[in-house]
Image (cartoon, rainbow, N blue to C red):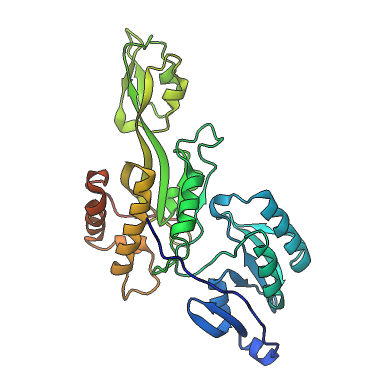
Amino acid sequence: MSKEKTKRRMHITVDHNLEENLKKKIAVDAEIEGIKGKIDFDKLKTGGFIKQRQKDKFTVRLRVPGGRLPVKKLKKAAEVAERYGGEYVHFSFRQSLEIPFVDYHDFPKIIEELKEVDQSIASCGPRVRVPTACSGCEYNPNGITDTQKMAQMVNADFFGERTNHKFKISFSGCPIDCARTNEMDLGFQGAVFPEWNEDPCTGCTICASACLEDAISPDPKTGKPVFNADKCLYCSDCIRACPTNAWVEGKKGHLARVGGKHGRHPFNGPVVARFISDEDVSVIIEKTIEWYRKNGEGKGRTRIGTILQEEGKMEDYLAHLRKALGDKVEKKARKPEEIRLL
């Protein structure tokens, strides 16, 4: 699937006019979201340069999709931080590396030096943010899906696309859900539906012991498993534990959740599709952004979870997805649920 990439030029020259600085304006030779000339601090934040409480100091947020930063980029980031930042770097909750205490006069040098290792700045504002992900199946024994591959896909195809408000995407490789897919505008979690073959089964009951959800209980006479699919979390623990390969992978893929968010008024996002392929993930992201833009029109900076709470919107959203993915989409789903903190 081809995507139009957002173009950004950040060759910045700074106006040293103190009065202009106090008005929270900086003169730049730049184009950020089509705006050229004097860019205020909010626009700089959009480009990944976040104003601090200290005068003329910014935090520069680096783009680290999936939380994976190659060693050569890490070394360069450390050099840049030591040269232009404070005494430390900060790793954000969304896996970005941030360099605090940067003077805005140094923006051009920082950008150019980071370009030497092809390291770019992240973004904020109403757009698709840098995707987050766990380590996935590459070396994590619990991993079911290749979350890092999916994070790179989102980074290449969807990062920076304009949306009504911030739009966060995450990938977890298993039901432990380290990447908190239920708290994202779109979240994808690895899942496997286990299938049992009777012939190789010896009735050892190991699978029942391995299942933490009590979805498997041993028959009292034969020891063979009795499976309650309603309790299954699709973790594949039974498959990994079975010594005779009686339990095998059935349907495998991603669970998709929509409308979650954290913050002052967090939402818990519901599952809207199960066992979808990597290719289907791209389709869901594209169609969700399409629906969000249309249904968020005229509503200002409103998260998709808030819109989905409106009467009939969840049904309309599912119907929109179903046009592209058919019966892979849930027939019905609850609205995003507000999590009461007090």
- Left or right of 170, for residue 118: right
At x 64% / y 90%, what residue is drawn? 20
Q: Tell me: residue 208, above or below residue 173.
A: above
Q: Position of residue 323 (x, y in %)?
A: 22, 54
The N terminus sits in image quarter: bottom left
Instruction: Say which quarter of the image contains residue 115.
Output: bottom right
Q: Residue at x 44, y 20 (%)?
A: 209
Q: Position of residue 18 (x, y in %)?
A: 70, 89
Q: Is residue 258 visible?
A: no
The answer to whether residue 106 of the structure is visible from this angle is yes
Residue at the (58%, 54%) spot, across then down: 95
Point 39% across, 37% down: residue: 191
Q: Nearer the viewer, residue 283 or 233?
A: 283
Q: Is residue 277 above or below residue 82?
A: above
User: Residue 139 occupies which quadrant of the picture?
Assistant: top right
99 or 23, nearer to the observer: 99
Task: Give the image location of residue 52, x and y in percent.
Answer: 65, 72
